[in-house]
Image (cartoon, rainbow, N blue to C red):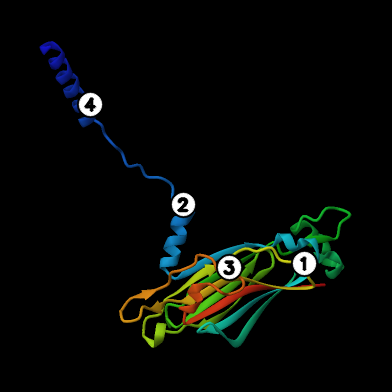
Amino acid sequence: MKRILVSALLCTSLLAAAQAQTTHTVKLVDTQLQDVLNVLEDMDIYIHRFDVSQFLDATYHVEVYVEEYKNNQKTGKVHHFDLGKNIRSLDEISEEHRDAFRETYQIPAGKKEWDNIKEISIYIRKEERTDTTAAIRISSPNVGIQGFPFTLYPADGKKFISYHTRPFAARAVQTADEMKIPLLLYGSAWAEPGTTFFRFCGENEIGPEMKAEILTHIPHHYVIGLQLKKK
């Protein structure tokens, strides 16, 4: 019996010694895209990209619009960014430049049309010099970049200004001659009543019907969306 007890104690001691000698190493790994996005958002820079390739089943004139809201009511201020047609043809190009366009857009011999707008990127950056304006940039590869500055307001009339983005939930859109699709919300944080805290929390996505609870708190926001008109 004593031998069994001694053996058990010896095994326990050896196991404890083995566990005590276990080592762990923290390794440096490659930076992930989310790390970069987190840093940019800490610098008040927001980047969002949208796939609009499903609309290439027909030719549409494409615009990006920006609408302003105060206390969830539209102010009437609307800005439009004209991106042109999502499908273009060499017939629109002067004959002397057609070969260059065919090479740039890799248009096969015997075809004239190419997919002009497949993706749209939205960049928003708070201006450091003024702190009360932000710059919006609308971009599409091989199409160009457009933008303008817009005004930011202190939360509930205070000096603190903090704006953040929320995407709209992706929903199937019934094909029509004209379509208007909200893409992104850029809105102000709000002061928590009776405290010195500011919040911007709630739904991670906004429904296109604009009934999200977070909208009842945001004192000022912009809605950025896509407007399509069939040619």
Name the residue that disc number 2 marks. Answer: 32
Residue at 10% x, 12% y is 2
Mark closer to the observer (3, 2): 3
Residue tagged 4: 18
Q: Of marks 2 and 1, which one's residue comes earlier in the chain?
A: 2
Mark 4 lies on a secondary structure that is helix
The residue tagged with tag 2: helix, strand or loop?
loop
Q: Residues within 10 Å of mark 2 (few under 14, many from 20)?
A: few
- Among the 4 quarters of the image, the one containing residue 22: top left
Q: Is residue 35 left or right of residue 194?
A: right
Q: Position of residue 196 (x, y in %)?
A: 30, 79
Q: CA distance from mark 4 to mark 2?
A: 36 Å
The spot of residue 209 in percent (x, y) is 61, 73
Is 117 left or right of 182, judged from the image as shown?
Answer: right
Q: For marks 1 and 3, give the CA distance.
A: 19 Å
Dot placed on the residue nearer the N-terminal end, 3 or 4: 4
Q: Position of residue 55 (x, y in %)?
A: 74, 63
- Residue at the limit of the structure toward the right, as seen here: 110
Measure the alpha-carbon separation of dots 1 and 4: 68 Å
Q: Which residue is mark 3?
A: 168
What amino acid is labelled 2 in the image?
Gln
